Structure formats: C-alpha cells, structure tokens
Image: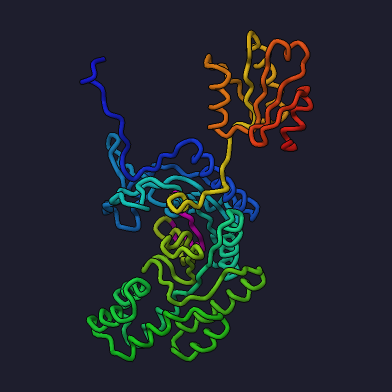
Amino acid sequence: MQNSDRITPRKLSGFMELMPEKQLIFDNMRERIQKVFAKNCFSPLDTPVLELANVLLAKSGGEIDKEIYHFYKGDTQLAMRYDLTVPLARFVAMNYDKLTFPFKRYQIGKVYRGEKAQKGRFREFYQCDADIIGNEQLPIVADAECINLIAETFKELNLDVEINISNRNILFGLIENLGYKNKTTEILTILDKLPKIGKEKASEWLKEIQLHYSAINLLIEVCNFNNDSDVVLRKIWNYAENETFKKGVSELKELFTYIKAYGIPNAKLNLGIIRGQNYYTGTIFETYMVGHPDFGAVCAGGRYDNLAEYYTDKKLPGVGMSIGLTRLFDQLDSHNMLGGRELNLTELEIIPLGDTIKHCLELSNYFKSQNISCEVNYDSRSFKSKLREADKKKIPYILVVGENEMATKTYSLKDMVKGTNFNKSKEDCVNTIKNKG
C-alpha cells in the first residue's frame, strides 16, 4: 500500500480511551463499586445498548432529542441508550409479573449522548446506577438505604465526599404558598444556578419574572439552609401551611432518623439542592468531593413517583443513585489524584535463557494454577532489555530460568521492588510472591 492510501488513525472526540496501566485502575474502581452494590443485595442487570426508538423516547412523545444517537436498520428505528433509567423502566414493565418487590437492581454500563465534547464531558461514558423500585408504595427508608449505598461506595474508593440532601416538595410547596405555582419551573431554574451566580444576580433574575422582594428573600434564605437537619426543619416548619410543603418537611425528618441509624457521617441537609426540574418528586441528593467543589456533583439521585408510567398502568415508585464513573475518573486523573492506586496485571514474569522455553511454559502453567498472574517473556531481545521492560511495566517479580536452573529445579527469583535475589524451588517462589517477600 502506498503512503497516499493510508488513513491517519484518529479517535472521535468525547470518547475516553486509556493506556493499559490506567485502564487497570479504571477497571479496579468499577469492580469495587460493583462489590459494594452486590454486598448490599442489589441484583445485577445488563440491558441492551440499543433500544427501539419509540420505547426509549416515550417520555418525549417520540421527538428525537438532539443528544440521542439514532438510526434506521431497514424500517426499524433504533436508538442508543442515553441513561440506564429508561431501560430499567422498560425492563420492569416487561417483567413485572416475574419480579419481587421492592426490586433492587444495579447496572454498570456505557451510555451515549451526542452532545458537544468538551473537558469533563463525554459522548460515551460509564454510569454506575443502583435503584430500588416499589410496587404501589415505597417507604422512605429506601431513600436512606440508597444514601447509605453512596456512603459505602465512596468509602470503598477511598474518596472523601459529602452527601447533600433535600426534598423537592419543600420548594414546590413554598413556591405554591407564595402564590407563584405557575412560575415554578422558572423559579427553580434560577435557584439551581444560585451557587454559581450568587445572591445578587439570582435576586435580579427573580425580579425580572415579577417576584416580590419578600418572596425572593425567603426563597434565597431557604436555599442557603445547610445546617443541622433537626434545627433547620424545626425552623422552617411554619414557613408554609400547604400539604406539599408539610410532606417535604415530614419526609426529611423521617429520612434523617434513618440516616442516623445507618451511622452515615458525611450526610447533611442542604435545601439549596434542586436537581432536574421534572424528574424527581421527593428526596434528592448530590455528592461532592471534599475540597474539590470544581468537580461538581460526582454522584446524584433521588426519588421519583412512577418509574414506568409510559409503559404500564402499574404504579412503580422508586429511588436511585448514579455515579458518572468516566467523568469521575477523568477528574481524578487530571488532578493527579490516582496516585497510590497503581495496579499491575502481571505478578511474575519468567525470562528464559538458552533452550528453556518449553520448561518456562510449563512453569507458567504451574504458577497460574497457584493463582499467580504470570507470563513468559519469549522476546528475542537481550536479558538486560527484558529487565528494563519489566521494570518499566512495574512487574514485581522476575524468574530467571537457564539450563542450570532447569536441571536443578532451583530458580533465580528477583524482587524488582526491593532489589533482592533468591534461589528457590518453584514452591518456595509461590510462597515468596504471595507473602510479598
């Protein structure tokens, strides 16, 4: 092939692709999250990446959202999942008679959004979701279980986080009580930006949509409440008398009794949490890295009244949480916070000297049977080159096998970390490697 015919290799923007050493760290994080989900008795689920477009887009009335990848295969219109919640809704509706409730499921998988690629935002990314679905009703204690799952997950990842919790009914009810129910969406949109734009700008925007100054001050005051839950909830109890507001306060009071029972140390009340304007209907929560507000929310979720209302007439309330693992990993990496997490797939590399390759292959089978990840370096380069490559790959142990070692069945084992050498039988090599010296 002539040079002019060759295609320059390049990757689509917005798609993460890691070198093997970083992929090992990513995979380890994913496995640890999965371990916590399973330990808490959430069942695994793996829905297809492709869905029928009319099923996936039911909530939008079949209109194609600009961010959704979709195409035709013959006469069938298909779409790539943009989250893991809509496929869950479809699955529960299809399998309602086969499931037991509450149904607790986790799913870790890739989702796709055709948005503008930029720093920290991806078109293909892993989400780690866990949801609890009820049949007709779901107690508030399920919300606490979901929050506890977040706390345990980030503890497993050795990441210091703070879980901020609110209830959408408080602001819904307060806005209704102030006489602005028809402007709820506009008000929440502005209040959601309060941490970024500040009180002065938020007040200005709320005035533009004709809110009275006393209403503006009250709403901003409530959004800034993030102290002890008992103190705040007692203080605001008489801020509004309608059922929606009282429901939100009562649910938060109950929720925090369960949070205390779980012993979650890093959960706090923050009435300024808004989240999506239409999706969540009660408890909402956002999780932030301590000392890194620039990361934004690294995990979020909340309660929704009816998961599968577009697919079934059964009432299926739920609560769920989601970690955007790809984005979290990218932020940790860009802030050099992956240190101390180095992993290596290979524990032992066998280097043959002379005509010993067959014996080395037999040895590799033995070490693998002892649950030691092992490979034979059969490259034709020099011994020194192989040692340099092993050191570069951070392989902890090297086993040198020459004809003398093959005859005596005593092998030269090199600890690449400590720089020490041993002459041992294969059985003793196993013990040394497993006990790390």
Residue 358: percent from left, percent from top: 65, 11
**Nearest the eye: 308 or 350:** 350
Within the magenta stretch, is there residue 320?
A: yes
Q: Which residue is pictured at 45% across the width and 37% down the height?
A: 19
* Residue 312 in sight here: yes
Could you tell me which quadrant the C terminus lies in? top right
Of all residues, the one furthest to the top in this rendering is 355
In this picture, residue 222 sits left or right of residue 398: left
Residue 236: percent from left, percent from top: 48, 87
Location of residue 409 with respect to 145 vertically, above or below: above
Could you tell me which quadrant the N terminus lies in? top left
Location of residue 395 with respect to 92 vertically, above or below: above
**Nearest the eye: 324 or 392:** 392
Tell me the quarter of the picture where residue 77 sits.
Answer: top left
Q: Which residues are magenta?
A: 312-326
Residue 155: percent from left, percent from top: 60, 58
Colouring of the image: rainbow
Tell me the quarter of the picture where residue 149 sits.
Answer: bottom right
* Residue 318 in sight here: no
In this picture, residue 424 sits left or right of residue 21: right
Tell me the quarter of the picture where residue 426 sits.
Answer: top right
Location of residue 194 with respect to 232 vertically, above or below: above
Location of residue 127 with respect to 72 vertically, above or below: below
Within the magenta stretch, is there residue 17?
A: no
**Nearest the eye: 255 or 326:** 326
**Nearest the eye: 257 or 378:** 378
Q: Which residue is pictured at 41% across the width and 62% down the height?
A: 294
Q: Which residue is pictured at 44% across the width and 70% down the height?
A: 281
Q: Which residue is pictured at 58% across the width and 25% down the height?
A: 387
* Count of numbered tags: 0
Residue 245: percent from left, percent from top: 45, 83
